[in-house]
Amino acid sequence: MPAKRARSVLILLAMAFLLSSGLRPQTRPSEALDETLRRLEAATPSYAKGLAAFRAGELVKAEAAFRTCLDRFPGHAYAHYYAANIRYIRKDYAAALASMESALARFDEMTELGAKIEARKAGQRDALRMTLDDLADSIISCRDSRSIEWERDAVDVEEFASEKAASGRTDALTRLKAHYVYFRGNVLFQLKRVPEAFRCYEEAVRLDPRHADAINNLIAILFVAREYPAAQAILEKAEAAGLDESLNLALKSQLFQALGRPVEGILYEDLEAGRGTARSSIRRFALAFRPAPDAGKVLYVNAYVVFDPSAREAVLIDPGARDARIGDFVREKGLRVRAVLVTHAHPDHAAASRFYASEFGAPVCAPRAEARSFESPPDRLLKDGDGLPFGGLAIRAVEIPGHTAGGLSFLVDGAAFCGDTLLRNDIGAVAESDATRRDRTRRTMIQAIRGKLLTLPDDTLVCPGHGRTTTVGAEKASNARLAK
């Protein structure tokens, strides 16, 4: 036995003897905390290496680093969680479950330790920050990214009072624990322990009512069990909470069919905009976007075919994923697609733009300020105020930076296609890590939304990149984000 390990065993035996004989070692609580902190600090570099390797897909290297971390600090709940992820990826579900049990058994202790660290050493938050950042990286839902963005503001002690920062940390840790419980449910599901998995998903939603993945899994299990009213109740509660973009819309459509309810408006919707003779027709498609071909998560994004019903000329806006329904609709209506318009360079809005440009023989038109962010160069670069006349469609580009460097909204005959700039009761997240710059960029973005979009007539249809459509009047009246 190595000398260092032998000394550790002797120390543990001595402590056990002292405790069993009614004696206590003469160690002050502050000294014990100092020693715990020392061990946590010694483990943190290995945890950071493991996290970097995991993000890079280097699982062998990540596993070794997390093992070193746990050797130095066995109570590191976050390292146990990533060990579970690695085993889950390898389909070693029994081992993954054991790691998740360890992660959850130690989670509250890790949280308490973090609170003590905050009380004594305000700068010791690196391990927690890295984990929360990784949680944010794993989320593909724009709305949940925005939710985390607001929480990050509360966590930043340079920007907010200490009481608010503590409250923000508590909220973030609750969300993180909900995610751990959810992941344990996934492992149990793979082990075919469905009732236990269902209870995990219920607990995850109790901790974090906005955990859309857990909600989707609850609905799916109930749907398979043909408990349609119970599934509908969960779905409606999630929609009331504004989780539209994160729900499994294909499953919702199947559920509505089973309930004998109409499905129009779920995976597609027909709309009209404009006034008098200057009217345009719109078909909204909800497309299932996957960040990778084998990704388990699906994010539903809106793509729009906007056309002049008389001239039969059309534009396609924000095709983030290939979907045969788009081509079928264009051919059915006898439309000529004159351009593929992209509001911003994020893949969920732009990934299929080149495919449809080739299919329809149309140019890709995208923001000039984001030209280098596209996988393949756009055919035409647009700036604020540029016009695009196609048949009876008069389109104007409006630049509103914030969510991205040069995000555009397209104004077309009584409708505004806003990408992720303006959404129903929300606005897009700001891609800034620094709190001061983030706050400044957000304020500038809000001012531009007020000046360029909310000045449009109240009945102007707002067609966002995710979720339901709305109107300018409704957003002026009820969008709390625009008041910040």
Image: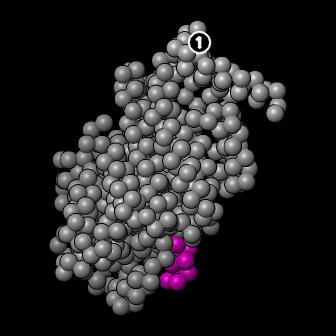
Spot occupied by residue 165 in the image (x, y as percentages of width and height): 40, 26
The answer to whether any part of residue 368 appears in the image is no
Question: Residue 424: which quarter of the image?
Answer: bottom left
Towards the viewer: 364 or 236: 236
- Residue 2 horizontal side relative to residue 369, left or right: right
Q: Residue at x 48, y 72 (%)?
A: 321
Mark 1 Cα-neighbour bin, 10 Å: few <14, some 14–19, many ≥20: few
Q: Amino acid at mark 1?
A: Pro
> What's the colour scheme?
one colour
Q: Quadrant of residue 376?
A: bottom right
Q: Which residues are magenta?
A: 352-362
Residue appearing at x 53%, y 34% in the figure: 128
Residue 354 drawn in magenta? yes
Q: Is residue 79 visible?
A: yes
Give coordinates of residue 151: x percent, y percent.
40, 37
Q: 231 and 94: which one is in front?
A: 94
Identify the residue shown where x is 47% and y is 54%.
184
Q: Is residue 390 magenta?
A: no
Give the quadrant of the C terminus: top left
Check the image and report above or below for 209 versus 37.
Answer: below
Q: Is 272 drawn above or below residue 45 in the view shown?
A: below
> Which of the two residues, 365 or 256, is positioned nearer the viewer here?
256
Q: Is residue 116 above or below residue 386?
A: above
